[in-house]
Amino acid sequence: MRKWLLSLCMVLALVACKDEKKQEASVDTRPIIKVGASLPLTGNLAYMGISAQRALQLALDKWNAKDTKYKYELLVEDDSFDTKRTMMNTSKLVYQNKVKAFFTILATSANVASTITKKEKVIHMTSSYGSQPAEGFYNFNNMTQYDSPTDLMLKELKRRNVKSIGLLVSNNIGSFEQSELLEKKIKEDGTIKVIGKYVYNPGTIEFRMIIQKMIENGEPDIFYIDGLTPDATLVAKYLKEVTGKVNLTTINDFIETPKRDEFEGLWFVESASGTDEFNNKFVAKFGESVFLCGANLYDNLDLFIEACEKSAHCENDEVVKLLLKVGSREGAIGKYTMDSEGIIQSEASIKVIKNGKPIEVKE
């Protein structure tokens, strides 16, 4: 009896030992690298923020499924596109959560976040209009820069024999800089006349009187809108009421809204914002198309993790140096090139809204 009990104890001890070893083997001992993002998950731009969050998660899932040196965690805070909340989120994620990299969309948020990330030498990768968000050693910006869409817009206006244009511009940094460059190039070219320009404050919802004032001395062949959601939708609505038609174009604004009924059949210029292959993958996972900035943030996180894995210790200075050596490649946004200033250069394209979707116009 004693022998039997002794044997049983030995067997149980061996089983327990094996289970303990299995448990030890299943524990992930990789060092954790935290990355953070402040995005508008509520408010007028929630659809863009949620799309960007999902794109970041796709990139994270891709890398965490691999045998990597590090395990990566994504922490996302909602800023509702409010600069005060962006500042609080950045402070929390940088100082409390100790994130190695930080992600934002649009210049308003990016420029606020940079006041902290630059000071603390945290890598900040955004998708924002203009070159300012990329200023500083630790900052990177993945958005088609102003020259490419502006040149393409002018070229298409001339191809369509447009002789006059009216400009509607929101008084925010991205819209203002983009429209200023377009106006400058139109005047330098000399073949198209700017017969009306109106700069309005963000949050404006009454465009009827603005349009009426702009056409007092004659109606332009086409109107150009450069603003924030839902500006383009409202302008299209009031253009139809005031003029009886919707002669309207833009750079990106038609795709910065989930409802595009007002833009059906209209052409516009779109920044590089997602290949068909990436969009199909996104739709298969989430049931809807990726919005502007989503594919850009996917590439941003993808690049950061790749550089982190290649580096010796994922220290920010060495990661930045590796990022600046990326060169040209193809990613979720299509073909792009990392320049020496940390700007990911890409090309714009002409698209038209058909059945609510942006379809590329082939030359």
Image: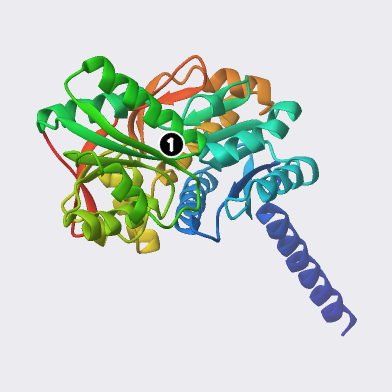
Rendering quarter of residue 233 = bottom left
Q: Which residue is mark 1?
A: 175
Residue 327 figure quarter = top left
Q: Position of residue 301 (x, y in %)?
A: 52, 38
**Label 1: element kind:** helix
Question: Can you name the residue that lies furthest to the front here?
Answer: 217
Mark 1 burial class by Cα count in 10 Å: few <14, some 14-19, many 20+: many
Q: Left or right of 295: which side holds 155? A: left
* Residue 152 in view of the camera: yes
Number of numbered discs present? 1
Amino acid under label 1? Ser
Picture residue at 35% right of the left edge, 57% below the top? 234
> Toward the viewer: 216 or 227?
216
Nearer to me, 8 or 41? 41
40 or 333: nearer the viewer: 40
- Residue 175: x %, y % from top left: 43, 36
